[in-house]
């Protein structure tokens, strides 16, 4: 049976204070230099309020599987999701987890020099320390054996994952892990969905890499199906 967010037990950031923020469907694992759980919760509530109000006013935004044009005065988090979806060619909700991680992380960045926000496998990082992001790929024997090394000069950064075999997210593909990396976590989230959708089997990993190369602003991707691995972009993989 799938155990949600079991990978959080593997997180090792001894220089930071880690805590969980849960508000309705939002479940964030956050690491900062000091305990900022109060500020984090207020940020989550603020952005959830923006999202919920917009969903109520424009219900097709939350239901669409294709990009949606939004008003110029829509909330910033809505505009970020819409732009990420346009670049990746997917529905705007494919960017919601990354967008929430990013906007909360940017808010916390005003209070902490080091910030890591994880939202269901979608991560936003900022700071001045080198970090390694482990790649979780369910039952694949590659799961937990590889990581992405992130240099301080690359931060802030979004590292997001889509999977057809891990977690509740919807995917048209069959990847164990489709990891996308971009400066925008919203874009990385939308891109991971687009890449994962394109891969129906290990033999189609190349299709996912082709999709990745066509997404403006994407820095790289890692695609895992079973014991097969495909990589594209300016990424530094390291063994764990």
Image: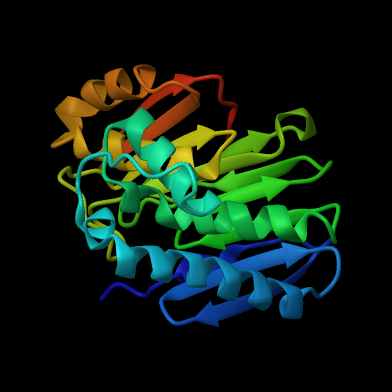
Q: Quadrant of residue 90?
A: top left
Residues 132 and 42: in front is: 42
- State the count of labels: 0
| Residue located at (81% from left, 75% from top) | 35
Q: Is residue 156 visible?
A: yes
Whether residue 227 is visible to the viewer of this picture, yes or no, is no
Residue drawn at x 29%, y 60% as measured from the top left:
58
Residue shown at the point (29%, 23%) measured from the top left? 211
Q: In x, y percent, where is residue 156?
A: 69, 39
Q: Please determine whether, in this image, residue 231 is positioned above or below residue 31.
A: above
Identify the residue at horizontal 51%, vertical 34% (top origin). Answer: 181
The scheme the figure's colours follow is rainbow
Quadrant of the drawing holding the C terminus:
top right
Q: Position of residue 72 (x, y in %)?
A: 47, 41
In the displayed structure, does residue 1 sit left or right of residue 189?
Answer: left
Along the horizontal axis of the image, is 97 left or right of 114? Answer: left
Q: Is residue 128 above or below residue 97?
A: above
Q: Of residues 15 and 216, which is closer to you in this image?
A: 216
- Asked if residue 234 lies left or right of residue 128, the reply is left
- Image coordinates for residue 185, horizontal then vertical, percent: 53, 44
Residue 2 coordinates in the image, percent (x, y): 30, 72
Residue 13 occupies quadrant = bottom right
- Quarter of the picture holding the N terminus: bottom left
């Amino acid at each position: 049976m799938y155990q949600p967010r079991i990978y959080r037990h593997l997180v090792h950031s001894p220089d930071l204070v880690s805590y969980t923020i849960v508000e309705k469907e939002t479940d964030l694992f956050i690491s900062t230099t000091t305990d900022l759980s109060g500020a984090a919760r207020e940020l989550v509530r603020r952005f959830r309020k923006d999202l919920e109000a917009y969903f109520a006013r424009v219900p097709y935004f939350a239901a669409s599987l294709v990009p949606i044009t939004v008003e110029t005065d829509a909330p910033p988090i809505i505009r970020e999701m819409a732009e990420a979806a346009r670049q990746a060619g997917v529905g705007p909700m494919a960017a919601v987890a990354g967008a929430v991680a990013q906007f909360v992380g940017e808010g916390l960045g005003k209070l902490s020099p080091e910030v890591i926000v994880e939202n269901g496998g979608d991560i936003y990082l900022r700071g001045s320390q080198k970090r390694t992001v482990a790649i979780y790929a369910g039952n694949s024997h590659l799961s937990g054996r590889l990581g992405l090394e992130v240099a301080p000069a690359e931060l802030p950064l979004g590292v997001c994952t889509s999977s057809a075999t891990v977690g509740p997210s919807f995917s048209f593909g069959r990847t164990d892990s489709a990891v996308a990396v971009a400066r925008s976590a919203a874009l990385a989230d939308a891109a991971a969905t687009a890449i994962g959708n394109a891969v129906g089997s290990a033999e189609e990993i190349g299709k996912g890499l082709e999709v990745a190369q066509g997404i403006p602003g994407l820095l790289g991707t890692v695609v895992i199906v079973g014991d097969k691995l495909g990589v594209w972009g300016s990424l530094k993989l390291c063994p764990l």
